[in-house]
Image (cartoon, grey):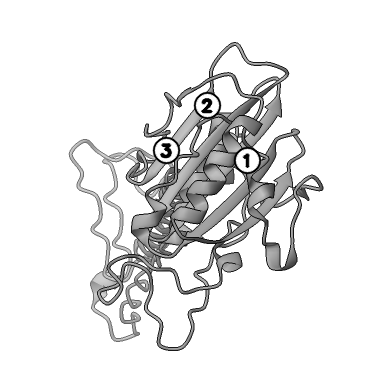
């Protein structure tokens, strides 16, 4: 709020004092006596008798100055309170509802993530999709491109990690039905899959998340990935997530290009699976979430958008 300074003009200077050399009018004139009652106190004046004129510098002048000062003080007080009231209203209108006590809004289910930062590039390497890297080749370490775990989550003990968050092709294929694994593995070998990195966590509500990044030799090979929702382990059927691509409150609809979001169709078993895929240049991201009783849509949408931002 911009502070408003209210200034009060100084009171007018006192008039020149009445000296002993002032005109005779400075002295109070004699009262006009009513006929028949000369000099008697309390005797009413005769009708039509004019009031004695006030001399310059008489007692009325100080009273006028006091009245002016009082009026100025009240005006200053009113302006200060008006400014404070306007500033408070402006502050409330500009603040987020969650910042004002008593006006907090219910969470929409988003998780709190650490601040995202673009990974460091090797010396001389361009950023993906830069002018000198139109194919979107990611030269940064694949582990640095992984979405970090949200605040308050625990590492997933069921995810088999190798050194530097790497996973084997066989570990990744455990997310799919056994009947699909051999074909997918052959496709990886034919289409230039270079490495897979992963990160997994579990949140307090029981949602289990796995994020996989698959790096290929070129963006054209990453386009051949067919594992987004196809034959996931224990999943009977997948369908497009109807809430994906819609605006949420003040949040605009996400740019869905290069992204796919699916959910396990109803009825599902003990738990529901959701999957999100992001294809960015030579990297294919696969994000899986499972939760007993049903997996919420917002956490997956959030994870997909943030992972897309990291990949560029």
In the rendered view, tell whether residue 164 sits above or below residue 281.
below
State the residue lying farthest toward the top.
267
Q: Where is residue 283 in the image (x, y as percent from the top left)?
A: 45, 58
Q: Residue beneath label 3, please?
A: 260
Q: Which of 169 and 17 is in front in this view?
A: 169
Badge 1 local density, few (<14 within 10 Å), some, or many (20+)?
few
Task: Say what secondary structure mark 3 lies in.
Answer: strand
Q: Which of marks 1 and 3 is nearer the N terminus?
A: 1
Task: Give the residue drawn at x 64%, y 55%.
Answer: 198
Q: Mark number for residue 4? A: none
Task: Say what secondary structure mark 2 lies in.
Answer: strand
Q: Residue beneath label 2, please?
A: 263
| Relative side of 9 to 111, left or right | left
In the rendered view, tell whether residue 40 sits above or below residue 4.
above
Q: Where is residue 64 in the image (x, y as percent from the top left)?
A: 35, 60
Badge 2 local density, few (<14 within 10 Å), some, or many (20+)?
many
Task: Give the residue drawn at x 31%, y 81%.
Answer: 16
Frontmost of labels 1 and 3 is: 3
**Distance from label 2 to label 3 (Cα)?**
10 Å
């Amino acid at each position: 709020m911009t502070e408003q300074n209210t200034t009060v003009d100084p009171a007018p200077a006192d008039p020149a004092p009445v000296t002993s050399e002032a005109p005779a009018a400075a002295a109070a004139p004699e009262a006009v006596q009513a006929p028949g009652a000369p000099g008697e106190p309390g005797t009413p004046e005769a009708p039509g008798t004019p009031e004695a004129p006030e001399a310059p510098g008489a007692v009325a002048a100080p009273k006028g100055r006091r009245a002016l000062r009082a009026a100025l003080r009240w005006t200053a007080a009113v302006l200060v309170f008006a400014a404070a009231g306007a500033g408070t209203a402006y502050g409330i209108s500009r603040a987020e509802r969650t910042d004002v006590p008593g006006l907090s809004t219910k969470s929409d289910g988003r998780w709190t993530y650490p601040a995202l930062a673009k990974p460091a590039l090797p010396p001389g390497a361009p950023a993906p999709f830069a002018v000198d890297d139109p194919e979107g080749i990611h030269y940064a370490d694949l582990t640095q491109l992984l979405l970090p775990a949200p605040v308050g989550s625990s590492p997933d003990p069921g995810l088999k990690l190798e050194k530097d968050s790497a996973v084997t092709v066989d570990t990744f294929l455990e997310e799919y039905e056994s009947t699909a694994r051999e074909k997918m593995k052959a496709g990886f070998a034919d289409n230039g899959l270079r490495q897979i990195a992963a990160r997994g966590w579990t949140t307090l509500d029981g949602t289990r998340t796995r994020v996989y990044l698959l790096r290929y030799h070129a963006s054209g090979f990453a386009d051949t990935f067919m594992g987004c929702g196809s034959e996931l382990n224990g999943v009977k059927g997948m369908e497009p997530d109807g809430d994906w691509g819609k605006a949420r409150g003040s949040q605009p609809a996400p740019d869905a290009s290069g992204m796919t979001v699916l959910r396990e169709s109803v009825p599902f078993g003990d738990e529901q699976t959701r999957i999100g895929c992001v294809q960015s240049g030579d990297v294919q991201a696969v994000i899986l979430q499972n939760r007993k009783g049903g997996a919420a849509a917002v956490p997956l949408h959030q994870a997909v958008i943030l992972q897309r931002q990291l990949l560029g």
